[in-house]
Amino acid sequence: MLTRDECRALTEKIIKLAKAEEVAVSVNSTQNCNTRYANNAVTTAGFTSDLSLNIQLTREKRTGAVTANELTDAALERAVRQAETIADLAPPNPEYVEPLGPQTYPDIQAYHEESARARSAQILPAVRSVVEAAEKKQVNSYGYYDVTAEARAIANQLGLFGYHRSTWADYSVTARTLDGKGSGWAQDGAPRVSQVNAQRVASTAIQKCLDSWNPKQLEPGKYTVILEPAALQEMLQFLAFSLGARAADEGRSFLSKKGGGNLLGEKLFGENVSLRSDPFDPRVPGSPWSGGGGFFFGGGGGDWLPAEKTTWVEKGVVRNLIYDRYWAQKNEKKPTPFPPNLIMDGGPATRNDLVASTERGLLVTRFWYIRFLQPQTVQLTGLTRDGLFYIEKGKIKHPVMNFRFNESTVNVLNNIEAMTAAVPVGTDLLPTVKVREFNFSSLSDAV
Amino acid sequence: MSVTRREFLKTCAVGTAAISLPEALDWETALASTAATPDPIYRSLMAVALDTATKLGATYADMRICRYHVQDVFLRTQTDLRTGNVVNVPRVNESERFGFGVRVLADGAWGFAASPRVEKEEVARVAREAVAVAKTNAALERRPVQLASVKPSEALWRTPFRKDPFAVSVREKIDFLQAINNEVRAVPKLFVVNSSLRARSEHKFFASTDGSYIEQYLQQIIPEYEATAVDFQTRTRRERSYGVPAVTGGWEHVEQARMLENARRVGEECVEHLSAPPVTPGTKDLVILPSNLSLTIHESIGHGTELDRALGYEANFAGTSHLTPDKLGKFRMGSDLVNIVGDRTLAGGLSTCGFDDEGVPTLRFDIIRRGTFVGYQTTRDQAHLIGDQESHACCYADSYDSIPFQRIPNVWLLPGSEPMTLDDLISGVDDGVLIDGLGSWSIDQQRYNFQFGGDAFWEIKGGKKGKMISRVAYQARADEFWRACDGIADSRFWENQGLTGDGKGQPPQTNAMSHGCAPARFRQINVLLTD
C-alpha cells in the first residue's frame, strides 16, 4: 500500500502535469486477503493488491475524468492528457461547483497493523474452528473471511491534501443441516482481526441452523416481528438512500412534500426513533472526508468536506437531509455528507425481554434480496432467510418457513414497540427491535 | 487447436434444427487466428508465473494479463424547478485498468494472487504468494480439486464489430444523447431524462500449464436512457426506459438501435403511467415482453441452474438452488414449449467469447429441453461432480484481481417453433396484463419465490390490449410459472436482451450476459397491487 509520502509525491506529480489547471486527484491503494469455504472445506482463497488513480480535470466548467492504475511517467502523462482531451470536448457543466481549498481533516484511527499483515495462515485458525464446530454438530458450514487494508489520498491544485489508512476484517458463516432443511447465519466485523469473534459467529450460526430445522408453515399476513440487527440494517439502508435533499425537493422521494418542497423538520417516525452517523466511533470508523455528491444525486462531484457527526432523525423528527455542495449552494444550506454509517439509539430491553413480551409473533434473523417497490413510500419487497421462528406467549415455539414481505421502512420505524441496546452490525450500530403489524405477503419454500 | 465454423456448429444443442435461430455469429472473423499474437514480453512473463508456481509444487497454474477500458458518457436533462429553465448536465469518465492474476493448484487446493504491477519480479512474487495461499488452505481441503480435461489452445479471438466505439468522439456521443434527451423532454410534464453510452473492452491474455496461450479482445456497447415524470400533488413518480439491448459489438449497434425514433413514445408512456389507474389484483394471464422476461429468465433459470449454487458453494452469500443434481434430467421446470440454452457463442451476447477464463472453448448447451431440466452451467473443477467429462465454459473473472469462478453465460429462451405473433398471444387472453421494461425484482435464495415489476403495463381484456395501468407486480414459484407458459412468439419477435451488473461471489464480482427471448404468455399468475 502507498504511504502518505508516496501519495503526496504522486498527486503533486499529476497536478504538475496538469500545468496548474483545475485538477482533483484521488488515489486508492488496497490489499485484500480472503478465504472462502463450503461444505466444511476451503473452495477459493486469495491475496491481492490493487491501485486506482482518478484524475478529474476542469477547464471553464468542462470536466474530463480519467481512472488509471499505471504509475510510470508516460502512463501518468497519458492519463492527464486524456482528461484534458475529454474536458475540451465535453460541454460545460451548469451545476459546476468551485473546488475546495486546503482543509483540516480529522485524524481517525481506523488502521491496525495486525489486520494489514493478515494472510491465509492468520485466517485459517478461525476457519478451522468453525469447520470443526460444525462437524461436531454434524452440520455443513459455509463461510467467508475477508481482511482488507486500504490507503486513500485526495489532493487538488489549491493545496488540498488528505491521506487515510483503514483496515476491516469481516467473517460471515452459514450453517446448514445435511438434509438441507435447516439454515442459520451469523457475522462479525471489526477493524482488527483479533476483535472478530469466530467462536461466537460459529456457535450462533450452528445453533440457528439446528433450531431452524424442519420449519412449519404459517399463513402470510401481518405479524409482530422481532428484527435482529442484520434484518433491521437491510431495511434501513434503503432509508439512507432516500435521505437526499435534492430528490425530496424534486418530488422524487418519501421526503417530498405534497405540492413541492421537502419534509425536513417533520415528525415522520415514532418518538423512540433516533438515527445518526458518527465517523469517529472506533467500533465503526468512517473516513476523514465525505464522498457524496455525484451525477445522479445532483452534481458537484466528490465533496471532500471534513467528516462530521450528523443527526438524521431525532425522536422521530427529520433533522437533516443529504445536501451535496451544489444543492446546498443553490438552496443556501450547509452541505451534509452521505452517511458513513448508521447508528440507531437503542432501548433498555434485552432480546429475551422482547421475546417474553410477545404474545404471537416472529423472530427474524435477516432478510434477503430487498428491492424498492415504491421509493415514494420506501415500500420494499424481500424475503426472510437463515432462521425465522414462531413466538407464542412469550416463548420461541418452532421454526417457520420463510416469507416474502411487502412493507415500508417508514411503517417499521413508526411501529417499534421496544428495542435492545445497539450493537455493531457490519459498519453500523443497530439494536434488535420489536415491530407490530409487519406485512408478510407470500410463502417461500427456500431454506 | 483450430475451431472452425463447422466444429462450432457441431457443438450446438441438438433438437432445435427446426427452429429459426437468431443471427449467427461470424465465427471465422471472430477467431482471427489460430495462433495467438506472438507477444514475447507477455509470453515471457507468463512463463515466469507458470514456472515459478510449478517449481514450488503447483500441479496446475494459469495466468491472465488483462487490460480493461471503459468509457462512460452521461447526459442528464431536466427542468430547474426554480427558474423553469432546462439544464443539461454532462459527465464523461474514461477508465483503464491493467494487471494480472495467477491461479494455482497445490496440494489439491486453489490459491490465487494478483497485482497491478505487470513486471517480472512482481509476477514471480505473486506466483509464490498464490502457491503459499493454496498450500495453507490445503489443510482444510476435503476432496482434492479435479479438473476436467481441455485441449490446449493457441488462438486469437475478437468480438466482431464494424465501428470501434472508442473511436467515436465524445462530442458526437454527447450530441447523440442530447438529441434523444431533447426528444423525450419535448413531452409536456416530463421532468428528467438520464441517458448514457458505455463502451467497455477486455483485452485478455491467458496461459496455462496445460499449454494454452489465448489472446482475446472482447467489446461491449451499452446504450441506455430513462425518463422520469413527477406529480407533486399526488407525490407520485414514474420511470420508463427504452429497452436497448446491450451487446458485444461496435458503434453500429447504437446507430441501428432506433433510440431517437423511440424517444417521444418513451416520454409519452412515462407521463401516461403517472396517472394510469391501479391494477385490480388477482390471478391473471400475463403476456411478457422480452425487456421484462429477460430478467425473469436470469433470476429463475440463470441463477437456478448454476452448479456451484446447487452444490452449496454460494450458500453463504447468493444462496443455493432448488434444482439439485438429483433433479437433473427429471424435473419438470417448464411446459413443453420451454427450451432454454446456455450459449457463449451467441452473436452479440454480452458473455460471448471464444474461450472462457480457464481456456475452455465456448459452446452452446441445453439447460431446459421441452420443459425438463437437463443441464447445468459448469467450470473445469465442477464437471466431474455431476459425472461430466468436459466443462460448459462458464468460468469468468470480472477483473485481473478477481478469482475466476462459475458465472452465468448467455442463457436464452428459444422462440416458438410455430408461427405466433405478439397479437396472437394477446388475442388468447380474456383478463390479463401486458408487461414491459424492468421494475422491482426479488427472488429467494433457492430461486423458488419471485416477485417482479416492470416499467409499463397495459390491461388486456377480451383479447385486446387496453389502457395503461400502474402499480403491478407478478409473484410466482419459478417452476409453476414456467409450467404455465402456453405461448411463445416465433423468431421474428425474438430479441437479444442483455443484462449488466449481475452480482455473485465473495469477494463480490459483477458479470454481464444476454437473455434473449420472444414475447411469451403465462396463464393464471398472481398479480399484486404494489403500494
Image (cartoon, rainbow, N blue to C red):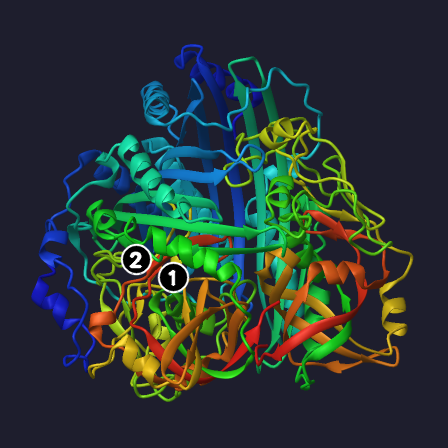
Q: Residue at x 64, y 49 (%)?
A: A242
Tag 2: residue type?
Ser
Protein chain holding label 1: B
Q: Position of residue A368 (x, y in %)?
A: 60, 65
**Label 1: few (<14), some (14–19) or many (≥20) C-alpha neighbours in 10 Å:** many
**Count of numbered circles on the image:** 2
Tag 1: residue type?
Arg
Q: How far is the residue under mark 1 from the one under mark 2? A: 10 Å
Q: Which residue is mark 2?
A: B351
Specify whether residue B68 is in view: no
Q: Which residue is mark 1?
A: B407
Asked if residue B369 lies left or right of residue B507, the reply is left
CB within 8 Å, label 1 to label 2:
yes
Q: Residue at x 73, y 31 (%)?
A: A308
Q: Residue at x 56, y 31 (%)?
A: A151
Residue A204's quadrant in the figure? bottom right
Protein chain holding label 2: B
Q: Position of residue A384 (x, y in %)?
A: 64, 70
Secondary structure under badge 1? loop
Specify whether residue B18 is in view: yes
**Where B82 falls versus A23 (above or below)?**
below
Q: Residue at x 67, y 81 (%)?
A: A220
**Where B125 falls versus B210 (above or below)?**
above
Asked if residue A282 lies left or right of residue B426, the reply is right
